[in-house]
Image (cartoon, rainbow, N blue to C red):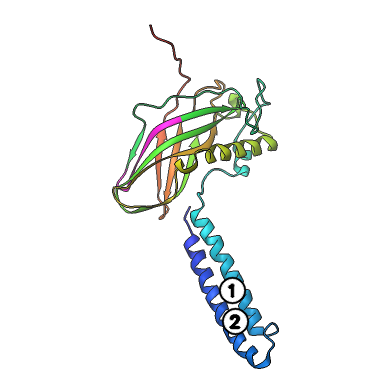
């Protein structure tokens, strides 16, 4: 997925300048007739200037907005969920059964000629007994100048034959909103798109839904964390599946 915000900003700027030029012509003519608002040059130029300014604002928003995460339509087509269990609720703040996996001492690493991806920490929360909300702390180190434009997390689907039921639309919307709320909770420590120079390194959190293994309903499946650069190349960090952990007190 390429970032076209720069084109939108540049195009909007050109349209605004052209509109301003037409307005100037209209003002010149209106100074003789004293009818500025009925002057066609001025009216047409004003319309172009407004459209250009709107394009610049939209392009600026798209440039600084962090893309990523599946849309509700994608969730509806892919995710699955039974009725809430054990009193589990939704995004009101009360969560259902939760399973968290401690950070790996040395997580998976992808090393390419452009960048290095390293999993530094991971948190997996079971959502309503059928899906997962994954929070991954990823360190990205650039080996050459690169622009990061998009992040995504894909997970293996256990399939309907394994007992995975379908989410209804209300559950799809709730899961999507819960994911966005969890992502916003990391604030400035989220992963951000942007330009990196050789030797630059940043570490941040990425939150996204994932499939829950069925029929086990525990642990997490094989996942692939993906990064898109400005040229459309994709870098994939594979995260192996993991079963539930058993922690016992020693001594």
Q: Distance between the residues labelled 1 and 2?
A: 9 Å
Magenta highlight on residue 114: yes
Query: Who's the residue at 61% across and 86% down the image?
Result: 27
Q: How crowded is mark 1: few (under 14 residues within 10 Å), some or many (20 or more)?
A: many
- What range of the chain is rendered magenta? 112-122
Query: Who's the residue at 44% across and 42% down the image?
Result: 226
> Residue beneath label 1, please?
49
Instruction: Say if residue 156 shows up in the picture.
Output: no
Q: Is mark 2 on a helix, strand or loop?
A: helix
Q: Is mark 1 on a helix, strand or loop?
A: helix
| Left or right of residue 175, residue 120 in this image | left
Whole-percent x, y for residue 174 in the image: 65, 36
Instruction: Say if residue 96 shows up in the picture.
Output: yes
From this view, report whether residue 100 is shown above or below residue 151. above
Answer with mark 1 or mark 2, whichever residue precedes in sequence: 2
From this view, report whether residue 64 is shown above or below residue 35. above
> Residue beneath label 2, please?
23
In the image, 197 versus 36, the foreground residue is 36
Whole-percent x, y for residue 36 in the image: 67, 85
Whole-percent x, y for residue 95 in the image: 61, 27
């Amino acid at each position: 997925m390429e970032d076209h915000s720069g084109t939108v900003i540049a195009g909007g700027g050109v349209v605004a300048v052209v509109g301003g030029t037409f307005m100037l012509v209209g003002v010149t003519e209106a100074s003789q007739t004293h009818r500025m608002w009925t002057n066609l040059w001025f009216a047409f130029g004003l319309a172009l200037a407004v459209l250009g300014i709107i394009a610049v604002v939209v392009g600026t928003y798209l440039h600084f907005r962090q893309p990523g995460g599946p849309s509700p339509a994608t969730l509806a087509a892919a995710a699955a969920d039974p009725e809430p269990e054990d009193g589990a609720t939704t995004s009101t703040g009360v969560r259902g059964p939760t399973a968290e996996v401690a950070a790996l001492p040395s997580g998976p690493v992808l090393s390419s000629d452009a960048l290095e991806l390293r999993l530094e920490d991971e948190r997996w929360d079971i959502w309503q007994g059928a899906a997962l909300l994954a929070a991954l702390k990823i360190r990205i180190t650039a080996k050459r100048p690169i622009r990061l434009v998009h992040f995504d997390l894909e997970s293996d689907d256990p399939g309907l034959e394994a007992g995975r039921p379908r989410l209804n639309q209300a559950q799809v919307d709730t899961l999507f909103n819960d994911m966005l709320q969890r992502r916003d909770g990391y604030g400035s420590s989220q992963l951000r798109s942007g330009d990196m120079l050789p030797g630059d390194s940043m570490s941040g959190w990425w939150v996204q839904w994932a499939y829950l293994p069925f029929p086990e309903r525990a642990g997490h499946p094989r996942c692939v964390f993906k990064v898109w650069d400005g040229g459309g190349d994709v870098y994939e960090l594979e995260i192996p599946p993991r079963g539930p952990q058993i922690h016992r007190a020693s001594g």
